[in-house]
Image: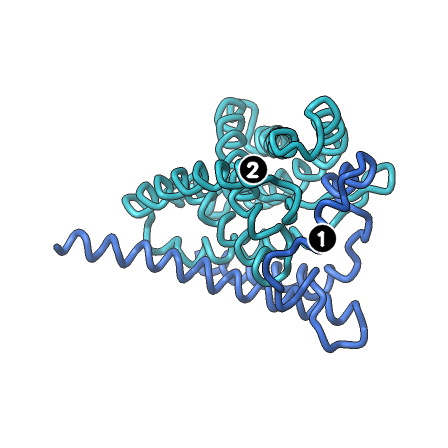
Chain colours: A blue, B cyan
Amino acid sequence: MRKEIWIGLVAALIIAGILSPFASPNPDGLEKVAETKGFIDKGEGKEVVRAPIPDYVMPGLASEGVATAFAGITGTVVTFVAAYGIGRLVQRRKAADSKG
Amino acid sequence: MHIPDGFLDPKTWIGCSAITVAMLSAAVRRTKEKLAEKQVPLMGVMAAFIFAAQMINFPIIGGTSGHLVGGVLAAVLFGPFSASIIMTVILLIQCFLFNDGGVTALGANILNMGIIAPFLGYAVYNALRGVGNVIASFFAAWVSVVAAAAACALELAVSGTSPLGVALPAMLFWHLFIGVGEGVITAAVVGYLERVKSDLLTEIVKV
């Protein structure tokens, strides 16, 4: 299954780092409904935390395409590490439980 | 379909969060019992792939777009309990790193996209497996998006944000189309894995 790991990671990085700037900028289904049914303003300025990379645009980069690509690569790597780490954590607890 | 802060009232987001926490603790218990060590890196890859794919909004009709949710893709490959954990990791990162989905709406977003989508989708997939993996995953993925959209509309209605008679048909309408995209992408990945005779379809312990 090593092959799948590499193919999957490379595919994810290509999608996030190369294709993401070309994604459709149109509102998604929920945003569209919020716009047409008049409740989009309920979400304006209500953010509880300030995210470091808001809306998948890496701050401090002049080109929005490049900023999106960097945000995508960052998110892909962080997601891989986080999911891998949580998987390992669950595994280790299992090993510890069976010993005790 | 990520609900932002401000769309849900406290009783709704607290209620959704409570259901989500209960379901996730069950998922962690189940996964802990059965998860095989060698597939842990693959769960990381699946999460990374779904995160990346979620960034790619595809245009549908009427100036609207949609993107993959991925709950059924994860459920078909890893089982629904593992899928809910994979989806939760993605939704947490989207929320806290990218402001995609509100912090107060996190429980509801995990419920819709990380629990309802993979579990219902997986049930549909299992019911249809007789007709082949690819067709079964297409319909399962389509159903998962439509169901998640309906759940979202219900949460908006309970919050008093938009009446059910308005929110439900509107959410269903757009997600009937977005669900086709979900189905095509999910079926394409499953079809590819089937064609290359990947171990992913046979050797993974589905939890």
Residue B50, given in percent of the width and then of the height, sits at 58, 51
Residue B189 visible from this viewpoint: yes
> For this rendering, which residue is in front, B89 or B19?
B19
> For this rendering, which residue is in front, B138 or A92?
A92
Element class at badge 2? helix
Residue B146 visible from this viewpoint: no
Q: Amino acid at mark 2?
A: Asn
Residue picked out by circle 2: B112
Residue picked out by circle 1: B56
Q: Which image quarter holds the C terminus of chain B?
A: top left
Instruction: Tell me the residue at 24%/52% (across/down).
Output: A94
Q: Quadrant of residue B24?
A: top left
User: Is B148 rendered above or below residue B192?
Assistant: above
Judge from the rendering whether residue B15 lies leftward or rightward of residue A96; answer left or right: right
CA distance for labels 1 and 2: 20 Å
Instruction: Tell me the residue at 74%/49% (across/down).
Output: B57
Identify the residue at the far left of this view. A100
Residue A54, given in percent of the width and then of the height, sits at 68, 63
